[in-house]
Image: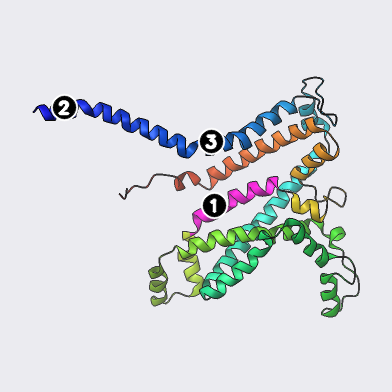
Amino acid sequence: MGAISERFEAMPHRLASSKARQRVNMIVFLGPAILLTLAFFVLPVIVDVVISFTDMGRSLRINEFTFKQYEKVFVGDRRLASVITLTFVYAFLTLAIFNVTFGLILALLTTAIPKVSGGFFRGVWLLPRMSPSVLYILLWVWVIRPSDSGLLNQVLKQIFGVKEVVDLLTTAPLALIVVSNGFIGASMGMIIFTSAIRGIPEHLFHAARVDGAGSLSIVRHITLPALRWPISFITIYQTLSLLVSFEYILLLTKGGPFFDTTVLALYIYRRAFQSGQYAYGAALALFLIILGVVVAMLGWKFLDMKTLLQKPRIEVN
């Protein structure tokens, strides 16, 4: 009886020791991630908010704290509405046509052929993403060059007999940035969807074929239902990525002609670093952050991402 009572008396100390050990482990493993998040995500937002309430210009001096930048955002900048509209059109077209749909098609095609051939094709498709942005855009500049030396004009002239020089930078700038960004953006969806397809149990495909199901029926009733969450993730992630990225647009079209391909992120960059309006750029950046949060919350709600993160009903030890 004495030994049993000693064990019960020692239990609170063991529980306290276990909780202390858990706290130490949490600090050791999560501490660096928390510090990096604070340093590179939270602190820049705080700095951005402070600068947006100033009159900081090219001299980097702050003379007063003011709400003028936000008045300009909501009232004074007549071009901002068209820039935001273009941003959503660009993001929607790139996402719907390439990042999700074309990425899914690539994943379905490369998993339907032998593994070696499919892996080789995916590796080739990933080369632009692994190469520097400047090199990727240089290839596009060569393709769309409005002269007889451009690849597109050579193909149109030699194969289709088109004599007039095609200048996509002038005639179809929006389509150009959608295609150039979409081709490289589809690679991420291709990898995520391929991984999800590989994770589907093989016996489901064998059973469907035994029952006489064709390839389209298998894709519709087995593959696509299994890709619900990967599609939702890619949709939200790529939407946020498209809202804040602009490097390919800057390198390819420089936002032109005029402002025809100037998305909101590029507009902020121009205002802050080219025009020297740092305070106004900070206000626009804060507006973009809020816009991204709203888009993320809407995607979380309508794509039901909360269900994906629910705890499993069956615990496996």
Q: Looking at the picture, which amino acid does disc 3 mark? A: Ile
Q: Nearer the viewer, mark 1 or mark 2?
A: 2
Range of residues picked out in magenta = 227-245
Location of residue 157 in the rendering, given as x and y in whole percent from the top left corner = 86, 77
249 is higher (above) or lower (below) than 31: below
Q: Nearer the viewer, mark 3 or mark 2?
A: 2
- Residue under label 1: 232
* Outermost residue, left side: 1
Identify the element where label 1 is drawn: helix
The relative height of residue 59 versus residue 152 in the rendered view (above or below) is above
Instruction: Read off the residue under disc 2.
Output: 6
Q: Are marks 3 and 1 in contact (CB under 8 Å)?
A: no
Q: Quadrant of residue 77?
A: top right
Q: Secondary structure at mark 2?
A: helix
Measured as percent of width and height from the top left, residue 80 is found at 79, 39
> Could you tell me the amino acid type at mark 1?
Ser
Chief SS of the magenta region? helix
The picture quadrant where one finds residue 76 is: top right
Circle 1 packing at 10 Å, graded few (<14), some (14-19), many (20+), is: some
Closer mark to the observer between disc 3 and disc 1? 3
Determine if residue 272 is in view.
yes
- Marks 1 and 2, Cα distance to the nearest angstrom? 55 Å
Residue holding disc 3: 34
Can you give x and y, in whole percent of width and height, for residue 224 in the image?
50, 62
**Earlier sequence position, callout 1 versus callout 2:** 2
Q: Earlier in the sequence, mark 3 or mark 2?
A: 2
Marks 1/2 in contact by CB < 8 Å: the verdict is no
Does residue 29 show up magenta in the picture? no
Which residue is at the front of the view, 108 or 6? 6
Q: CA distance from mark 3 to mark 1?
A: 26 Å
Vertical comparison of 49 with 312: above or below:
above
Q: Residue at x 69, y 62 (%)?
A: 128
